[in-house]
Image: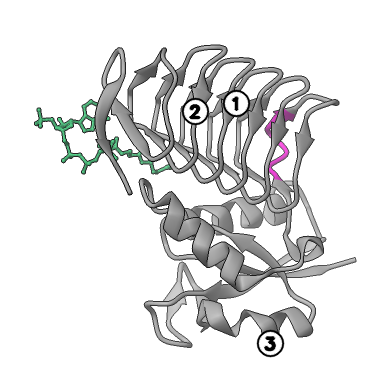
Amino acid sequence: MEKKIIILGGEGNGGVVAACILDMNNRFKNKELRLCGFLNDTLKIGEKINGYPVMGKTDDIQKFIKEGYYFVFAIHPIGHGKTRIDLFDHLNIPEDRLLTIVHPSSFIAYNAKLSPGVVVMPNCYIATKTKIGVCTLVMANSVIGHNNCIGRLCHFSAGSVTGSYINMGDASDIGLNATVLEKIQIGTCSVVGAGSLARKNIGDYEIHVGCPAKLLRICK
Ligand SMILES: CC(=O)SCCNC(=O)CCNC(=O)[C@H](O)C(C)(C)COP(=O)(O)OP(=O)(O)OC[C@H]1O[C@@H](n2cnc3c(N)ncnc32)[C@H](O)[C@@H]1OP(=O)(O)O
């Protein structure tokens, strides 16, 4: 059955997810996903994002839920995890309307578990027994090792590498090309900066950067 899709977000993560869906339609002949447009709180209705219309504000979502649309939550500003959680909870999207997307070039182990709304972009690898929470984005060329427990609304930026036996709270970010060593605990709403090497536990709301990563600041 064809699914009408609306992306919540803008040109950044939203536009990138849109391109992934179009690639699945065009190159991989996926006929199930039909991208219709965006919900965006800064642009006007009718303005275009990569050729697709802004159909409303995020607060208009209940109308589109009633009309049978499916949704991708792609509002992931780095270092603003709490804002992300508050907005997502406020929207109250039924889980069966959160679209899970896996680009066909990615590998997901048979016993990994992706929650509703997870997006896995091209060329990713998700290993055995890893669980990923609702609406987490795994951007291109990311590797996530085995036996991890990842919260909801997290964001793995392009090229990030996350080891194994990692627990990660909700709405945390792993930056571009960052590496997280095995058995690390990462809190809620925390950040591993771009290109950083996390080898020690990271608390809630902490931003760690560098190689090895050290606490830069608290992002409350
Ligand atoms: C396709 C996609 O997925 S796209 C989206 C992905 N985007 C990213 O991965 C970007 C991640 N963001 C970062 O790494 C940012 O630098 C953050 C969030 C960690 C920090 O941002 P800010 O708080 O604005 O830090 P700011 O730029 O003020 O830098 C503060 C200090 O930390 C240092 N610093 C900042 N980021 C890093 C980093 N990633 N690695 C090492 N040092 C860093 C800066 O050099 C500066 O040091 P100084 O005071 O000695 O000059």
- To which residue does mark 2 refer? 186
Identified at 82% across, 62% down, the residue is 96
- In depth, the one of 19 and 60 nearer the eye is 60
**Residue 95 occupies which quadrant of the picture?**
bottom right
- To which residue does mark 1 refer? 167
Q: Which mark is residue 146?
A: none
Identified at 60% across, 26% down, the residue is 167
Q: Is residue 161 above or below residue 6?
A: above
- To which residue does mark 3 refer? 63
Dot 1 falls on a residue whose secondary structure is strand
Identified at 62% across, 46% down, the residue is 152
User: What are the residue bounds of the magenta stretch?
Assistant: 102-107
Q: Residue furthest right?
A: 1
**Residue 179 occupies which quadrant of the picture?**
top left
Question: Is residue 108 left or right of 220 when viewed as pictured?
Answer: right
- For marks 3 and 1, the one nearer the N-term is 3
Q: Is residue 213 above or below residue 96?
A: above
Q: Amino acid at mark 2?
A: Ile
Dot 2 falls on a residue whose secondary structure is strand
Residue depth check, mark 3 versus mark 2: number of the one nearer the observer: 2
- Looking at the picture, how far across and down is residue 220, in whole percent? 33, 49
- Looking at the picture, how far across and down is residue 11, in whole percent? 42, 62
Cα separation, mark 1 vs mark 2, equals 6 Å
**Quadrant in which ligand 1 is drawn:** top left
The CB of the residue at mark 3 lies under 8 Å from ligand 1: no
Dot 3 falls on a residue whose secondary structure is helix
